[in-house]
Amino acid sequence: MRDLGSGFGYFMKGQRWVAQHGRWWGFGLLPGLITLVLYGAALVGLGFWADDLTVWATPFADDWSSPWPGLIRGFLTALLFAVGLLFAVVSFTAVTLLVGQPFYESLSEQVDISQDGTAPESGLPLWRELLISARESLAVLARVALYGVLLFALGFLPLVGQTVIPVLGFCVTGFFLAEELTAVALQRRGVRLPERLAMLRGRRMLALGFGVPLVLLFLLPLVAVFLMPGAVAGATLMARDLLPPEAPDDSAGGADDAEAAGGSYGAGGSRGAGRTDGASGRPASLTKADRPAARDWSH
């Protein structure tokens, strides 16, 4: 249960970090505001057209006696709008992160720098990072949709459907929300979706302690927009905890160890080129010291 409290602690630390760095909080608001306008327009359109959609989808009810056509279509209209609203809540973070990828990467890098003076980078071009982020976000949304259909069906069970299933729904949504937010920091470290899911399953209570409070708060109008910068900051801090500690450098090994590792040091003695992560064998993420300068999209 300690992890549950720690997860909530990371949420609070993230909000505190952006409160202490007001420029980055304002910078992190921009993607949320853009996404909010898009989603607001879509929901308004759904509200105007929901009646026509249900009438079009239920031609069999035209011959029913009153008041049944109105009742069934009114119920389906309300259900359609509720499903649209639920999808908006679930997908808001994924879409905001996709829209704000350059913004949140810069914010996440600043959080890393504030902790130890360095910020790992993937070394990939921006278009490649956006492509990977979009593909993995779609994979997460597919998983959420699958769980959503299953939980919706279980919701018709007497008693359990009105008590246990809604709680499970919040937990599932909170878990995947934590995954989406930690992805900003973990993608820069070369950690792909299957590895991230495995990490979070291993620390499930940590993920729930971070994600479930956000889900509940995101249900309030406009709250998600103002909490997103702090959520990204807190998720970056949590990502640092999820990763195993780096092995200390062996100063006695010197240049021989670097050469045996496959060229850990370049010709000029700079770190970065050819480094690999001994645990997974994939290229290690580059730090700020490895690159000329970080992208700063705040100007």
Image (spheres, rainbow, N blue to C red):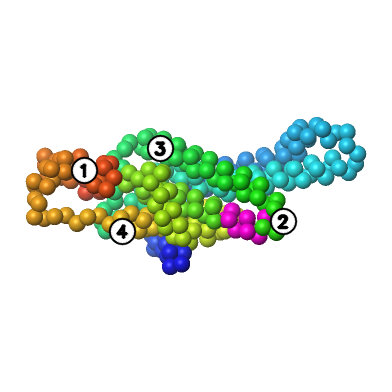
Query: Real-space Cα distance between discs 4 and 2?
Result: 51 Å
* Helix, strand or loop: magenta stretch: helix
Residue 63: horizontal and vertical position, in percent?
Answer: 88, 33
Which residue has dot 4 on it? 114
Mark 1: secondary structure: loop
Asked whether the beta carbons under mark 3 and mark 4 sit within 8 Å of each other, the answer is: no
Label at residue 132? 3
Mark 2: secondary structure: loop
**Along the viewing direction, whichever of 100 and 273 lies nearer the viewer:** 273
Q: Could you tell me which residue is drawn at 41 percent across and 44 percent down?
A: 194
Q: Type of residue at label 1?
A: Arg
Mark 4 surroundings within 10 Å by alpha-carbon count, few (fewer than 14), some (14 through 19), many (20 or more): few
| Outermost right residue | 65
Which residue has dot 2 on it? 158
Asked whether the beta carbons under mark 2 and mark 3 sit within 8 Å of each other, the answer is: no
Which portion, as a residue range, is magenta?
Answer: 161-170
Query: Real-space Cα distance between discs 1 and 3?
Result: 21 Å
Q: Could you tell me which residue is drawn at 39 percent across and 58 percent down?
A: 238
**Quarter of the view holding residue 291:** top left
Mark 1 surroundings within 10 Å by alpha-carbon count, few (fewer than 14), some (14 through 19), many (20 or more): many
For the residues carrying marks 1 and 2, which lies nearer the camera in this image? 2
